[in-house]
Amino acid sequence: MKPKTLSILSFNILGMPLLSRKYAPRLKKIVEEIARIDPDVVCLQEVWLGATKKYLVRQLAAVGFGHFYRPMAGRRLSGLLVLTKPKIFAPQKYFFAPSVENFSLPLTELLVASGYCWFELSVGGQKMIIVDLHLSVDWQFNLASAQGLGLGRLAELSRLAKEIKNLGKRKIIVAGDFNLEKNSSVYRKFLQISGLDDPGRGSIFKTTLFNLYRWPMAKSGQQRDFIFTKNLDLSKIKVQLLWVQPFPQIGCLSDHAGLLMALKL
């Protein structure tokens, strides 16, 4: 029987064990939550390249995620991880250079690899391109507002937009941490140059996520992942914000909220 829906979960897990709080219990709870929600595709960002990725692949394979793509990012220690139930075809990757702030490199830019990977899926007789992305932070602007559009960020957006346009009429889903807010200059510019749609454009999402780093800093605020689409019927898509409330004894799962998209095939 052909599947009736394709569900995609996107989540930045804040996967830096030495720099974040309650790392092990958060990771265990993330696995439990993914198993409970049971999507077809999981697009993760900021996943520690060593033990964390091995743990996630092993634990989620036990609940049906038999395929994964773990693009390596040179010497940077945290990056992307995709886990799927359908088989992955033709995976590819592209990573951005670290973003420079006032002629210096912030620590997170040295640790976290921003960039994107993409692959093909065949589900319910339909072929689709899925992209997992982590856009760089524009450090010259306020991180909490995620409003800025500097030259570095514009170059990253333009490169991905060109890739998307080259795919023509193919069905495309782009998921990930864009380090932006809805209706910001980054958001509007990316949709304009890529031709992507936001299925959650009309939804009102409210999040209050608290600092998980080991050093004092302001609340991360209303950060969340996005899922954009192209050449898909928006009336057949539903989106849901995930993990906006803290869990007992654990707290927030990340400094970002996750997003779940369900596409009726």
Image (cartoon, rainbow, N blue to C red):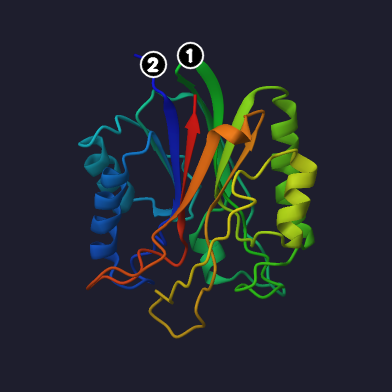
At a point 42% along the width and 64% down the height, the residue shown is 244
Q: Judging from the image, what secondary structure is the residue with disc 2 in?
A: loop
Is 201 on the left or on the right of 4, as rendered? right
Res 12 visible:
yes
Q: Residue 85's x, y, as percent?
A: 34, 29
Q: Do the numbered discs 1 and 2 sit on residues whose CB atoms are within 8 Å? A: yes
Q: Earlier in the sequence, mark 1 or mark 2?
A: 2
Give the farthest residue toward the bottom.
Answer: 216
Is 49 on the left or on the right of 127, as rendered? left
The circle drawn on residue 199 is none
Residue 167, picture quadrant: top right
Rounded to the nearest whole Å, what is the CA distance between mark 1 and mark 2?
8 Å
In the depicted structure, whether residue 66 falls above or below residue 252: above
**10 Å crowding of disc 1: few (<14), some (14-19), many (20+):** few
Q: Nearer the viewer, residue 112 or 254?
A: 254
At a point 70% along the width and 49% down the height, the residue shown is 156
Q: Residue 16's x, y, as percent?
A: 39, 64
The quarter in which the N terminus is drawn is top left
Res 79 visible:
no
Is 57 on the left or on the right of 181, as rendered? left
Inspect the image, locate mark 1, and give the three-letter code of the amino acid beneath it. Gly
At a point 22% along the width and 36% down the height, the residue shown is 63
Q: Judging from the image, what secondary structure is the residue with disc 1 in?
A: loop
Q: Nearer the viewer, residue 27 or 123?
A: 123
Q: Residue 164's x, y, as percent?
A: 70, 33
Q: Residue 113's x, y, as percent?
A: 53, 54
Read off the residue under disc 1: 125
Read off the residue under disc 2: 2
Q: Nearer the viewer, residue 54 or 174?
A: 174
How many numbered markers are drawn?
Answer: 2
Inspect the image, locate mark 2, and give the three-letter code of the amino acid beneath it. Lys
